Amino acid sequence: MHDLDAELWKLGVSAKTKHNEVAPAQHELAPVFATTNIATDHNQLTMEIMKKVADRHGLACLLHEKPFAGVNGSGKHNNWSISNNDGKNLLDPGTTPSDNAQFLIFLVAVIKAIDEYADLLRFSVATAGNDHRLGANEAPPAIMSIFLGDELTNVIEQIETGVVKNNGTSRTLEIGVSTLPVLPKDTTDRNRTSPFAFTGNKFEFRSVGSSQSIATPNFIINTIVAETLSQIADRLEKAEDFNAEVNAVVKEIIKNHKRIIFNGNNYSEEWVAEAERRGLPNLKTTVDAIPALVAEKNIKVLEKHGVLNRAEIFSRYEICLENYIKTIRIEALTMIEMANRQILPASLAYVRKVADTVASLNAAGADSSAAKGKLDKLVSLTSSLQAAIDQLGVKLEEVDAHEGDLLEHARTYKDVIIPLMGEMRSFADKLETLVDASLWPIPTYGDLLFGVI
């Protein structure tokens, strides 16, 4: 029999620190949680300082994930790694077989965690603002997957098959003994379309929205990885042949969870179809993602590790839905007010100006067809905008008069209100390109992005 405490220590896991035996603060992985707390505080302070500095200079700091359609959104790359009490990064590939065995155990623990709890991870970045960003203009999609790079993926595949090919020859590959190859460092192109990418000795979770606190994404990652590490530790503690069990665990996890690994273009329609074939969840919107929080398997893992109890989970579930509803409602009401008090008056003023031009040309016997064509287009768009404003206002009243279940209420906002907002915005965008710049009351895209006046 192996001295299991000593062997597990080599793998960065203490056999005496399972979740149900010690308080979280005493856990071998406690530094991970402490560092996460500090990083969360720093990020929150940074956002606050950005807003205050902008305000002092007469500016506004926009933390909205996608304030401008068709332009790169704003998010956060949440760098996540894990270390032991000595500060050793457990996701750092080593130069010896034992170091690499340790690395592989922690790597596959993350792979298993992301695959089994992809829906919960997607929930952690679910906000109304982030819905506009995910899957567009250099932001990862809503489908959770892991990018490992070609070289590390190749090593993973060799481990699964048990055969490593080198210089045209092959030999049996066993983890924890001398045949394990030196694992590659970060030689990837750091695929910008991937939501969860391995970049040498850490993972980058790129789906976090710019207005978000990083607390939720990090406590979710910490919890689900702690769960898979706990399962692995339980198996290794009982092993009679430690190296053989390490080998079996790594191979088994790779075989069962390799579907989450994808190194290609996450934006392609082919990946959407492939992800569906693999059985990966595609929770496209916040309303689709929030129910994942109260899925029974997710409640169990959060309760098991003492992170949230059932009451706290359902409280957050309701708060997230209420925040989504209130956010979209405020945005819709703001749109209506801006359109009624700024865009419509400017459009009508320009309609009158063009109409006067048409009348003057007709009175002079000149050709007014060009001016008349523009007038007709302006009148049509202005009328369409007014109709869209009225329709959105009516629907808002109808939706709020029949609130019912919170989830159904949120779905109605997603399925009814947001499309009407998009339709209304399309008419305003077209008018922006036609109305005299001196009459347009708000900055245009050219003003904002290129300083064009």
Image (tube, rainbow, N blue to C red):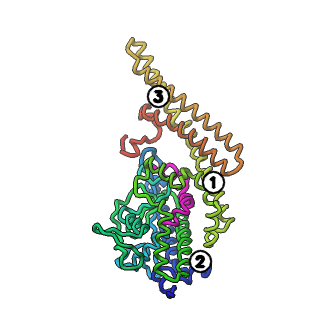
Q: Which badge, 2 or 3, comes first in the chain's sequence?
A: 2
* Range shown magenta: 111-135
Residue 62 image point, x, y percent: 47, 53
Question: Magenta stretch: residue 260 in it?
Answer: no
Give, as a three-letter code, the residue at label 1: Leu
> Residue at position x 42%, y 61% from top?
147
Residue type at numbered disc 3: Tyr
Please provide percent x and percent y for residue 282: 53, 52
The circle drawn on residue 19 is 2
Of labels 2 and 1, the one closer to you: 2
The residue that mark 3 highlights is: 350
Cα gap from disc 2 to disc 1, whole angstroms: 31 Å
Q: Main secondary structure of the magenta part?
A: helix
Q: Earlier in the sequence, mark 2 or mark 1?
A: 2
Q: Residue at x 55, y 60 (%)?
A: 124
Closer to the camera, 31 or 168? 168
396 lies left or right of 194: right
Q: Which mark is residue 321?
A: 1
Tag 3's secondary structure? Answer: helix
Query: Under tag 1, what secondary structure?
Result: helix
* Picture layout, residue 252 above or below residue 266: below
Q: Relative to 337, is 321 above or below?
A: below
Disc 3 to disc 1, C-alpha distance = 41 Å
Nearer the observer: mark 2 or 3; the answer is: 2
User: Of the residues tagged 3 and 1, which is closer to the observer?
Assistant: 1
In the shown orientation, is residue 440 left or right of residue 19? Answer: left
Q: 26 or 432: nearer the eye?
A: 26
> At label 2, which amino acid type do we have?
His
Please count the marks in the image: 3
Q: Residue at x 62, y 78 (%)?
A: 20
Residues packed near mark 3 inside 10 Å, few (<14), some (14 to 19) or many (20 plus): many
